[in-house]
Amino acid sequence: MKKISRRSFLMIAGAAAAAGALSACGAASSAPASSAASSGAAASAAGTDKKWIIATDTVFVPFEYTDETGAFVGIDVDLLAAIAADQGFQYDLQSIGWDGAVAAVQSGQADAIIAGASIKQERIDSGWMFSDGYFTATQTVAVPSDSKVASFDDLKGAHVAVKNGTAGADYAESLKEQYSLDIAKFDDSPTMYQDVLSGNSAACFEDTPVMAAYIKQHDLALKIPDGMENDGSPYGFAIMNKDNQPLLDLFNAGLKNIQDSGKYDEIIAKYLG
Ligand code: GLN
């Protein structure tokens, strides 16, 4: 697993995109490239002869995060490892942050994303192709431990914090008008929580199990009021280019196998048991 900053990844991605654009122009001028590609693929199960680049978040506990020994771990990390071993494919997992990961897959610099990505109709409509769901989570709010906030009425006119481009941010947006919320956007979860801890925001929005785990892990002076969550949806592994369908098929087949074998339950219990 390589860990690189979002900024440097995007710079590399930009350079690679420029190079890719040049080679794509070259390919377009010379006619049939497809027959060579398909005969190679027939030699092994589709998608197992390639090293897939898979992008993920940096801090989304317990799905992906760096533990006290400095190892990059989590449910997504272990699920992907187990599924790849089961299906015999290779990958390079790159921890670049939520919106960086989304941008990398959108631009073709990564093949797929695994980052507790909620399966949402708006995403499907904009070109995301999701695997079967592998975990269901709602989104909700966290407030300071001594806060009296118990409903959205108590947040009327408040500053709230969200993480860019997430289901939590969408949830806040959906309540913005009704409760006159003033929404501040952050690149990652830790800085978003910090905005609430510093008293700048009255609440932040994120996935319920993730907030619970992060608050516990860091012993933060935050709490999650009851009854403020949305309906939620399952998490899926996703591609955004149909050429990567073989990878999506491998993921689904492997997910089913590790669910049948008990390996999936073992991974969930390791982080949430
Ligand atoms: N589940 C949320 C979403 O899909 C958050 C994902 C994340 O922050 N890694 O938007």
Image: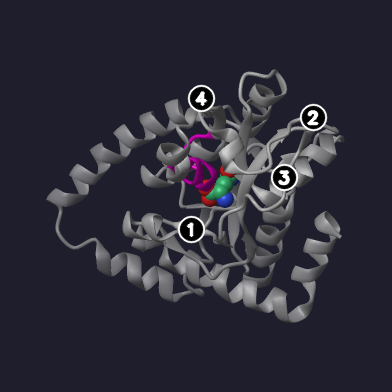
Q: Is residue 67 visible?
A: no
Q: Earlier in the sequence, mark 1 or mark 4?
A: 4
**C-alpha gap between disc 4 and disc 2:** 40 Å
**Helix, strand or loop status at disc 3:** loop
Q: Is 99 rendered above or below residue 201?
A: below
Q: Earlier in the sequence, mark 3 or mark 1?
A: 3
Residue type, label 1: Ala
84 vs 185: above or below: below
Disc 3 crowd, CA 10 A, few/some/many (<14, 14-19, 20+): some
* Precedes in sequence: disc 4 or disc 2: 4
From the image, tell me which residue sits under label 2. Answer: 146
In front: 51, or 252? 252
- In the image, residue 12 sits, relative to residue 169, either above or below, namely above
- First in sequence: mark 2 or mark 3? 2
- Which type of secondary structure does the marked residue at label 2 adopt? loop
**Residue at label 1?**
238
Q: Quadrant of residue 37?
A: bottom left
Residue at (56%, 60%) from the top-left corner? 231
Q: Nearer the viewer, residue 161 or 157?
A: 157
- Going 44% across and 38% down the picture, which residue do you hit? 176
Task: Decide if residue 13 is on the left or right side of residue 216.
Answer: left
Mark 1 lies on a secondary structure that is: strand
